[in-house]
Image (cartoon, rainbow, N blue to C red):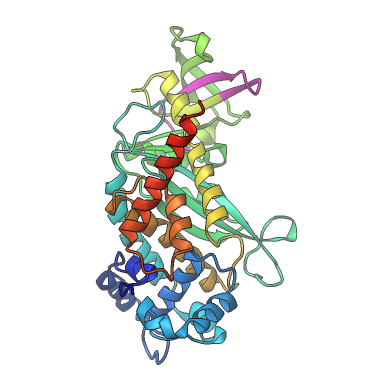
Amino acid sequence: MNSGKYVFSQLLEFVNRYEFDRCVKLYSGNYRVRHLNCWNQFIQLFFGQLTSLNSLQGICLCLKTHKKKLLHLGIKQNVAVSTLSRANEKRDWRIFAEFANYLILLVRPLYCECDIPKVDIDNEVFALDSTTISVSINLCTWAQGKYSRGAVKMHTLLNLRGSIPEFVLITDGKYHDSNALDMIIPQPQAIYLMDKAYVDFEALFRINQAEAFFVTRAKTSQRYAVIEQNFNIDQDKGLRADKTIMLVVTKSKKLYPEELRLVEFYDSQNDELIVFLTNNFNVSALEVVNLYKNRWQIEVFFKWIKQNLVIKKLWDYSPNAVRIHIWIAIFTYLIIAYVKVSLESKLSIYEIMQVLGISAFDKTPIRDLLLEQCQFNQNVNEQLNLFE
């Protein structure tokens, strides 16, 4: 008989309880709490994300059905749906945001050596974008979106070395993307990749003043004067122009009074001329293009979390509950990324998530579980190779 710990309980051992309690104490999360403290609230929500349960009712029902195993899972007790919902509504969401930020600082260095496709530079590279979660305006009245619809926005700054989120801001759907730039403190020598929705010259000049770099798409209405032009470019690779410019519109020039670089690239696949704007004069024009191409990693990240975590279906609809829900999802992604490096697993984060999700009540050691799966994948690949 296997007397080991359940997989879910083993997974909780990767969570630093001391740091979590520090975050709880910082925001008085357990003040006057009798039954469901912050730790048990967190565990139950984490369980819901890991096992892809689409509602609080599903979480509570599943835990109630297995109530004899709860202590072995690390859960003190099962609670009613109303108790869990009330905790999500009243507990300060910053507890979970603070703990997720601790995890970001823990996980980010573990992926710092990851390569970025077609980019050979040592700078930190970040992509900034937002994704929209559609909600019912009748249930989520605070989350106003476009055309009288409900929407929640998740603004994310993604470190492209390992696809680790660096910054997350949760707002209603009408919050303009460029406003998120005001919340970010630029890191010197880092490169920020953004689409044209983030062309805010005041914010871009703040990045420049911090000795950081940005690469974005230029707006078609943008007016400028050409100061210098580099004619030594490789047109066979799609490059059309590499210019040094100054803004000429009075307001824009006042907000960004220094020189900028304009790179034009012809996308033959889509028959489109793309114009990039940057303050980086140290890299080649082709590297500017390749840097921006990697911005699509954040789109892949958004697609991944929506397909593999409970994001599109919210468990509750109050502003506090929605923020807790999304931060727990971010935490789940980070802890799986941490497990991957800690156990030196060759599986992807997606594969680890799938394996652990269906093995929560198994007693196999996590290391053996993931290594067996790696061996299985290797054997399948070898069998496939026989027919090549």
Residue with the most extreme left position:
18
Q: Can residue 60 be found in the magenta stretch?
A: no
Question: Viewer-proximal residue, 362 or 384?
Answer: 384
Is 320 on the left-hand or right-hand side of 104? right
* Rendered view: 292 above or below 333: above
Residue name at image x 46 percent, y 70 percent:
47
Residue 79: image x %, image y %?
49, 86
Question: Viewer-proximal residue, 255 or 174?
Answer: 174
Is 221 on the left-hand or right-hand side of 68? right
> Which segment is the magenta one?
255-274
Q: Can residue 269 be found in the magenta stretch?
A: yes
* Rendered view: 311 above or below 211: below
Residue 100: image x %, image y %?
37, 62
Is 209 on the left-hand or right-hand side of 84? left
Residue 207: image x %, image y %?
38, 40
* Rendered view: 310 above or below 58: above
Residue name at image x 38 percent, y 84 percent:
76
